[in-house]
Image (tube, rainbow, N blue to C red):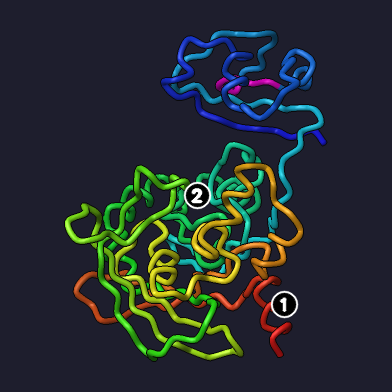
């Protein structure tokens, strides 16, 4: 299908020819004969129709259409949960990237929201991992983003996740505080580890509560006190209760390493028990007015299909 893209040329694109710019914009496209891939009479720079391979300048608004464009399939069914004059919250499906990745540009949460909502300049206030479903907050335009982004940590008074994990904890409630960091010798470079004594890392705190015990698995409520990378996933794995379907933190990261080696088997898929990790950003409490106890609580009840299927399989 033919797809229209819009972009603002960054400083990295300054002085590049259009075709060279597109090489960098679409690194995963092998057939980069842009003269034939671009739809004729459908390339615009600063609202002026252009042809050929012009030189680009920083700040220019670029709009162009590609023939027969394809991306990795994602669940694009985001849903509006709440809004006020400045902000809004949406449900993000699992396996939908929040912003562009190496292989998804057109179908990301940010791009979908801007195309399909009343806020074409909506700005993300935070992010979720691609596999994590649940609540994501936006500002309605760049002006509101500049107001609320610096106040994000006071705006979000509470952030609650739910997780389906392997095993049954002996505790009912537990607060975990430790330092998290990556390790240079880890075969999985993005994996976060609980630091040993004397090891440098970022302080992280999560409050856990067991909501249900489910025949060898458990439903856990996870309240973020800090917001470090992979914090909930790393903490639960350290406690011996990795999240079901977690490709990095469950089963010593075997699935992730197999994928790196392009050697994933049907048995590897089955062992995970889910096509994505079962972590869900379930609710947030917003404090919109300073020095006030009044909060707006937003709850997402759109549990992923894989979450529901997993629970159905246990019953």
Give the overall secondary structure of the magenta segment: loop
Instruction: Give how far across and how far down residue 28 sits, in percent.
Output: 66, 30
Quarter holding the N terminus is top right
- Residue at the (73%, 62%) spot, across then down: 267
Q: Is residue 108 above or below residue 82?
A: above
* In-front residue for pair 244/303: 244
The reply, left or right, for residue 32 in relation to residue 18 is right
* Residue labelled with disc 2: 122
The label on residue 284 is none
Q: Is residue 67 above or below residue 310?
A: above
Quarter holding the C terminus is bottom right
Q: Nearer the viewer, mark 2 or mark 1?
A: 1
* Residue labelled with disc 1: 309
| SS for callout 1 | helix
- Magenta span contains residue 193: no
Q: CA distance from mark 2 to mark 1?
A: 33 Å
Instruction: Give how far across and how far down residue 298 sits, in percent.
Output: 47, 75
* In-front residue for pair 315/44: 315
The reply, left or right, for residue 94 in relation to residue 138 is right
Q: Is residue 187 above or below residue 168?
A: above
Q: Is residue 287 visible?
A: no
| SS for callout 2 | loop
Instruction: Give how far across and how far down residue 236 sits, in percent.
Output: 42, 72
Q: Is residue 72 above or below residue 173?
A: above
Near mark 1 (Cα within 10 A), the count class, few <14, some 14-19 or many ≥20, is few
Near mark 2 (Cα within 10 A), the count class, few <14, some 14-19 or many ≥20, is many
- Residue at the (21%, 54%) spot, across then down: 199
Give the magenta range: 43-47
- Residue at the (51%, 28%) spot, across then down: 8
């Amino acid at each position: 299908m033919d797809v229209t893209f819009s972009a603002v040329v960054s400083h990295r694109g300054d002085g590049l020819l259009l075709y060279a710019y597109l090489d960098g914009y679409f690194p995963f496209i092998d057939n980069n004969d842009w003269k034939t891939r671009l739809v004729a009479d459908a390339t615009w720079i600063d609202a002026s129709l252009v042809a050929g391979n012009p030189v680009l300048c920083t700040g220019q608004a670029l709009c162009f259409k590609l023939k027969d464009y394809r991306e990795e399939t994602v669940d694009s069914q985001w849903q509006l949960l709440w809004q006020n004059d400045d902000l809004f919250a949406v449900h993000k499906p699992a396996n939908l990237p929040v912003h562009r990745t190496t292989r998804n540009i057109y179908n990301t949460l940010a791009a979908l929201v801007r195309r399909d909502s009343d806020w074409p300049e909506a700005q993300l206030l935070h992010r979720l991992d691609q596999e994590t479903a649940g609540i994501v907050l936006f500002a309605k335009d760049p002006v509101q983003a500049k107001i609320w982004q610096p106040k994000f940590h006071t705006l979000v008074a509470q952030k609650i996740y739910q997780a389906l994990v392997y095993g049954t904890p002996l505790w009912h409630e537990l607060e975990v505080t430790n330092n998290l960091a990556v390790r240079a010798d880890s075969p999985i470079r993005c994996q976060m580890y609980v630091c040993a004594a004397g090891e440098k890392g970022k302080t992280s705190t999560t409050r856990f509560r067991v909501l249900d015990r489910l025949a060898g698995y458990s439903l856990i409520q996870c309240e973020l006190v800090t917001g470090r990378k992979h914090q909930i996933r790393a903490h639960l794995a350290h406690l011996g209760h990795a999240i079901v379907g977690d490709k990095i933190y469950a089963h010593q990261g075997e699935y992730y390493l197999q994928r790196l080696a392009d050697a994933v088997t049907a048995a590897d898929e089955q062992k995970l028990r889910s096509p994505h990790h079962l972590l869900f950003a379930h609710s947030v409490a917003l404090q919109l007015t300073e020095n006030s106890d009044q909060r707006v609580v937003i709850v997402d009840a759109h549990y992923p299909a894989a979450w529901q299927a997993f629970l159905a399989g246990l019953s």
